[in-house]
Amino acid sequence: MNEEENIGWEGPPPLEICIVMLSALGDAVHVLPVVNALKRAWPETRITWVIQPVPYQLVSDHPAIDEFIVFERKKGPLAWQSFRDVAQVLRNRQFDLLIGLQAYLKAGILTGLIQSKIKLGFDRARARDMQWLFTNRRIPQHDPQHVQDQYFEFLHFIGVNPNPISWGLCLSDREREEQEEFFARVGNHACAVVVGTSKRAKNWTPDGYARVLEEVESRHGLTPVIVGGPSAVERSIANRIMAATKATVVDTLGNNIRKLVWILEGSALLISPDTGPLHISRALGTPVVGLFGHTNPHRSGPYRAFCDLIVDRFKQHPEEEHTVTHTYRNRMKCITVENVMEKVSLALERYGGPEE
């Protein structure tokens, strides 16, 4: 059999499937419609996900996942112990299908260590760090497309229908209570704002955010809520914004991923560059004004929703053809306050907002 020939799935459903996707909140969000489709097609199949601690916080209670193996990445001379720990946990396990959704060396090493009859990965053109060496089946080569559609290629390869597409991010009763208490304090009409990412080239300007926060408060009556993680970069940017703005800002930066989820779920909208909360908002159905000047929104924007709210400065001129590419550009500074506020007004007009 050609290694890139669609195998469908003949015979009884697989007993056990292993998903290897370790890091990045946005990527974890893209995995959810994949596991939902697998569970819908094969409800008795046991699904195990090898994942890192931060995205695990996001999906730990997801009903489509039967088991998580948390990969604790150690540093220095103990680095290899991280891989041995996972191999030890799974030493007596034999999966029917492993789906390698992450094309990086550490994920490839884990794929090599885990026992599975079929190890399905990317084609050679897309398999970074020689990930293809660790797999025995590969999806066919494909033109660039949205990351979510790229993940669906794995489903098509094994004959599983991704539709209806669903993420299944839900809040617990306790989280609902915390959410109600929070919005009772800050007001029921919040504009969540992501001010920094792990890649500086994706970040917009602190001064631009300072002016936008003033505008969303004074013009639309929204409470600006800064959301994000605990990184020094985010903390520094947030401090600069709050020192420069006249808006009354609620600062919620921290390492509580589930709190981030219920803030996004309860907000009127989100303003965000290309980073995890943008994709979480899409999964929750919260309108998101996406700021794109470094990455291509047709590849990494909110999937099939809120495209009308994207501030697209990745395009260098209005006539540029809309294509999906892997290229990067340094155009975040081309975004203006007026660009963002135009989309904020559009979001409130089309998707609802506070009553005037």
Image: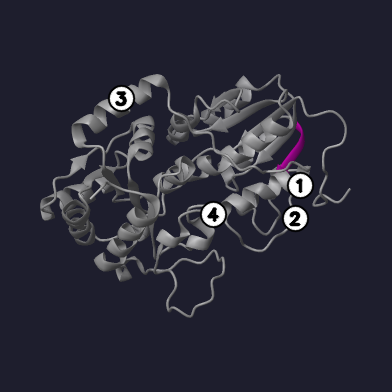
Q: Position of residue 30 (x, y in %)?
A: 55, 44
Rendered view: 258 above or below 292: above
- Left or right, residue 32 beside residue 302: right
Residue 129 visible, this angle: no
Q: Position of residue 245 (x, y in %)?
A: 13, 54
Q: CB under 8 Å between callouts 1 and 2?
A: yes
Which amino acid lies under the numbered mark 3 shown in the image of this protein?
Glu
Which is more foreground, mark 2 or mark 4?
A: 4
Type of the residue with mark 4: Arg
335 relative to 178, above or below: below
Query: Residue 53 magenta-drawn?
Result: no
Farthest residue, direction front: 356
Q: Quadrant of residue 183?
A: top left
Q: Which residue is mark 1?
A: 157
- Say which residue label 2 marks: 140
Q: Amino acid at mark 1?
A: Phe
Which of 314 and 102 lies nearest the eye of the viewer? 314
Which one is in front in this view, the residue at disc 1 or the one at disc 2? 1
Circles 1 and 3, Cβ within 8 Å, touching? The answer is: no
Q: Secondary structure at mark 4?
A: loop
Q: Nearer the viewer, mark 2 or mark 3?
A: 3
Helix, strand or loop at label 3? It is helix
Q: Quadrant of residue 125?
A: bottom right
